[in-house]
Amino acid sequence: MIVGLLCRHYKIYQGLNFIPICNDYENPFTLFIGNNAVGKSSVLESLNTFFNNGYWNRTKSTKSDEAFIAPVFLIRKDEIKENIDEEYYQVLLNLSNYFWEVTEEANGNLRNNEVFEKFFQFRDELKYRYGKDTYLFFILGLDYTEKSKVYYSTFTTHLDNSLNESGIDCRDIMIINAIREYYSYIYIPVESITSEIIKIENKEMQDLMSTDILYEIDNILNEKTFTKKNGTTRKVSLMEYLNTNLDDYMNTINQTIGLIDESYAYKVEHDYKKNLKPSDVRNRILEAYFSIRTLKKDKKEIYELSSGEQRIALIDIATAFLQNKSDNNKRKTILAIDEPENSLHITKAFGQFDRLYNLVGKNQLLLTTHWYGSLPITSIGNVQHLDVKTERENKVYINTFDLNNYFEKRGSLPEDIQMKSYFDLTSSILSSIRSDQCNWIICEGSDDKLYLSHYLNEVENLRLLSVGGCGNVIKVYRYLFTPFLEKDEKRAIESKVLCLIDTDDIMHDLEISSDIKGKLKLARIQPERNGTIKLQAVSKSGYYSPTEMEDCLSPLKYYNSIKEVVMNTDDQELKDIFNKFKFKEGSTSSRVKNEEFSILEPKELVPYNEKKRIFNFLDDHYNKFLIAKQYTSKERGELPVLFNLIKKYIEE
């Protein structure tokens, strides 16, 4: 994936800049936020210049021989090794060895340089997190005035000298071409014309489909499918069949006119080719077959739709192809979109981003946005906040936040953005309730969302949203509370919103009502003393016992899911500890930690510190998600009590 970018004199990025992009290899997603004209789109555009030879938008009044673009890559060795020529893999291996280890001592210009200090710090964090034994780390750049050689910024001379001793030409432009073959970079700018992009014959569509239409046509033309009989029977290609029959036809014509005078004949000039080639035919096929087939929706041409509808269509087409990309296709896709919410009504923004998030994993996703409602609903990847302190200053300041703990560790992110993110999200929820009459369940984590989706997938007009923690669910509830209180709003709203939280060790007191006329409800999951699950109000009064959604599942199914995840780890000690337990027959809940009601029954005396190992494993957010994935992959079975209560609340 692309983890960063070194550049000089590209649009707003005057002078030398290092732009961090993503540090999460498993979830390569980046959201660029900030005001207008702070350089969000410039990052995506510069990468398009590098990968697709897009227009090089050099900063005005700067020296052309100083301008360059150099993406920074992090790639698993086992992913790229079999999908690139061995010659270039060895070059990348040597480049990686160099960039994992190089220090500021390599070049005087690297010392006391703020930009390279950030680069080295970023590199070292990746080294600690991923390791040089498993991953390649390198930069590849293009110089504005010398695009025929690879450029490595300030490292170029030192690197060239280092690798030349081993007989390696690190400046060979074919290295970049090999990376361009490995990655498909699809850039959709905000001003793009949707009807042009989605033409089948266009490069963007070819990249989305992971096919080369010219290559496919050539295959059809050259495939030996026709039977030719001239004494012997053999298979011939369509091109050979056409050429043979056209030659026979032309010979017949020449024989006919030769009856008058043998000096007449249709012949090919000496310097011209005699037979048709695939390239002659495929261009006509493109023109006559594909160009007349345009994408339509409800029998309308795409260009006849509104701007917002066109934007939705574009994202629909992109997600359709990328989600269904064959596992045999080893080419990696990087999808970069400027402002997916552009021209959309606020009710559509949530769905637009939700579809795009589902692409992350197999694909790298880079987005710019002004719709900050996307921040609370994302728990993977990075958000890059860009800012220019003064209008006269050309320096872009970048703060990076991990979206998996964005709200817990938001650091120096401006307060107005924090507020706007919740305002945008709740505005989108309210608008969708009014226009689409959707019901919403706001839950804590992505694992909770999986369980809810598993059991409530048949409930109509239901949207599920995880916002990353109890505090965030309560915050969304507070933002929705006032609009739901208004008389006009209550009359306009026919749908319901359930904000669902666990019962934690810390008791929460809202100081406002937990329920508004049965339409907006904040509830905590709580079993009563007899074990009966209830959706309780959030207050400091009443019975209180820490409870998670995982405690309210199908006991045996949850036990088996835990066992399968534990046994798939490399932690032999944990496996040995888990094997000291068996499933407690007759369990009525799926609790693990409660000694009396736990689904884990010890086969022998198990020390508390060993039990604690299992508890800690189950409390880990990533392990929670893995267990939820395992659980929801199984047959649904009967609805547990909790999900029946939720279903009843939504449908009644």
Image (spheres, rainbow, N blue to C red):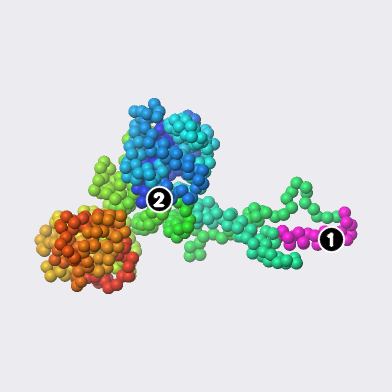
Q: Residue at x 85, y 59 (%)?
A: 257
* Disc 2 target residue: 365
Above or below 371: residue 450: below
In which quadrant will I find the C terminus?
Answer: bottom left
Which residues fall within the magenta stretch?
242-263
Q: How many marks?
A: 2
| Residue 614 drawn at (x, y percent) | 21, 58
| Residue 403 drawn at (x, y percent) | 30, 49
* Disc 1 target residue: 255
Side of 392 where 329 appears, left or right? right
| Residue 475 drawn at (x, y percent) | 22, 54
Check disc 2 and give the amino acid type: Leu
| Residue 600 drawn at (x, y percent) | 20, 65
Q: Residue at x 48, y 34 (%)?
A: 166
Q: CA distance from mark 2 to mark 1?
A: 64 Å
Dominant SS in magenta? helix
Q: Is residue 47 visible to the viewer in this orientation of the structure?
A: yes
Above or below 341: residue 111: above
Q: Provide the secondary structure element on which disc 1 rests.
A: helix
Q: Nearer the viewer, residue 325 or 336?
A: 325
Side of 476 where 388 appears, left or right? right
Q: Is residue 646 visible to the viewer in this orientation of the structure?
A: no
Check disc 1 and give the amino acid type: Gln
Which of the two labelled residues, at mark 2 and mark 1, occupies the earlier sequence position? Answer: 1
Above or below 180: residue 509: below
